[in-house]
Image: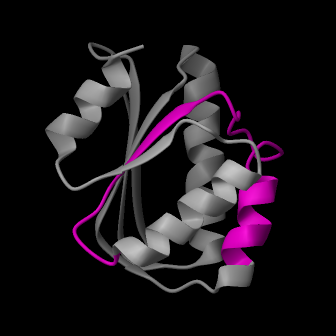
Amino acid sequence: MNIEVDFLERSNIVSGRISGELTKEIAKHYFTEVGEIAAENGCERVLTDVRDADINVTDHDMRVLSKELVQIGLSSSYRRAIVLKDDVSVYKEWGNHCFSAGHKNLRLFVDCEVAKEWLSEH
């Protein structure tokens, strides 16, 4: 498991990167860390880079985790961008589960700079 989470002060974005295997437990750990850093800095913009992650979760895992996000510190008002290289269908499912759980500001990107621009719009 390799998780990095930083606060980018200049752009007011919590930036995270997951590489290697990505399971429900690892995702939960990542979102907990993101929530803590976002709260400490009063930031509601999150950039998650999963281009080097190998996703290993079931549809059930995604549905359950999407409903737990608020409890583990990820507000539904957060603007979240996910940067990925492929396997878009799995992340689209994740986005749909998050949307159903009340997280409306979630977008998927393949270009990190475009994702940062979108996060900075509001």
Q: Is residue 50 left or right of residue 33?
A: left
Taking the spot 19% from the left edge, 36% from the top edge, the residue there is 114
User: Which image quadrant for residue 75?
Assistant: top right
- Residue 122: percent from the left, percent from the top? 42, 13
Task: Classify 44 as above or below 6.
Answer: above
- Residue 86: percent from the left, percent from the top? 26, 74
Magenta part of the chain:
61-87
Taking the spot 74% from the left edge, 70% from the top edge, the residue there is 63
- Residue 34: percent from the left, percent from the top? 55, 41
Say if the magenta span includes residue 85.
yes
Which image quadrant: the N terminus? bottom left
Say if the magenta span includes residue 93.
no
User: Which image quadrant for residue 19?
Assistant: bottom left
Q: Is residue 49 left or right of residue 28?
A: left
Query: Which residue is at the front of the view, 116 or 107?
Result: 107
Taking the spot 48% from the left edge, 66% from the top edge, the residue there is 92
Task: Classify 1 as above or below 40.
Answer: below
- Residue 72: percent from the left, percent from the top? 76, 47
Query: Which residue is at the front of the view, 68 or 32?
Result: 68
Taking the spot 58% from the left edge, 83% from the top edge, the residue there is 57
Q: Is residue 116 visible?
A: yes
Q: Is residue 8 visible?
A: no
Q: How is the image coloured?
A: one colour
User: Which image quadrant for residue 23?
Assistant: bottom right
Please tell me how many numbered marks the rendered image carries: 0
